[in-house]
Image: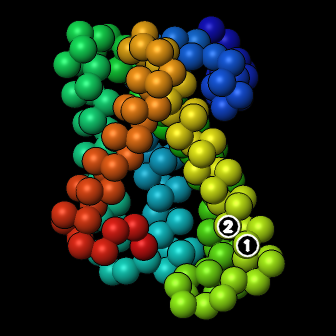
Amino acid sequence: MRPESVPACILALLRLRGGPQDLPYSHGLLWKLILLSLLLDMVASHWLAAQQGSVLRILVVSGFSLLLPWWLLSWVGKRARFVQTLSALLATGIVLSLVFLPLAVWAIDHGMAKPDATPTPQQAMLAWLILIVVVWKVMVTAHIWRQALEWPLAGGVAVSVALMLLELGFDRLLWGAGWT
């Protein structure tokens, strides 16, 4: 596979047209995506004014998030798909984070972090945009899992939602407040 085709594969994944098997089996690509994802999480944490200890929190929760796909693929006997599956999850997660981050910054800057406030029409529109991005992320992740596990879409959605809830639960267990 040519290096310039990796972005095309990522775009296909985001459009639910390709699968993780379309990405190269490359430990180098996987490590670059892991580092880029960690860097993006740290930048997002800074921009979103997250609480102290964010670097440790990001490293621990990210480590847990990297282990979940390995465990699941091992459990169903498809460990050989780990590199491409995790690469697909990370690459699409990075792109969707780049879409989500400006929305989150705008939401915080315009008072959406205050739960008792009555939303303005702009805040309501932003809430819908954020919901669209979240649903898109769930569907992309479900599509990747469906391909990796050779399950129907409903199984992919179940895995996608279950893993997101496990990550959130792990974060809350260790830090108590959830995502900040």
Residue 59 in sight here: no
Return the residue nearer the eye: 123 or 58.
Answer: 123
Q: Quadrant of the C terminus?
A: bottom left
Q: Identify residue type, mark 1.
A: Ala
Which quadrant is the N terminus positioned in?
Answer: top right
Is 91 on the left or on the right of 107, as rendered?
A: left
Give me the residue at 34% from left, 40% from top. Answer: 162
Residue 92, position as x, y percentages in the image: 58, 37
- How far apart are the alpha carbons under marks 1 and 2? 5 Å
Residue drawn 77% across and 68% down? 125
What kind of residue is marked 2?
Ala
**Rendered location of residue 44, percent (x, y):** 53, 65
Q: Are marks 1 and 2 in contact (CB under 8 Å)?
A: yes
Q: Extreme right residue here? A: 121
Picture quadrant where residue 94 is located: top right
Residue plotted at (47% across, 15% down): 152
Q: Is residue 171 left or right of residue 146?
A: left
Residue 116 image label: none
Query: Where residue 105 sits: x, y (%)?
Result: 64, 73
Numbered label attached to residue 124? 1
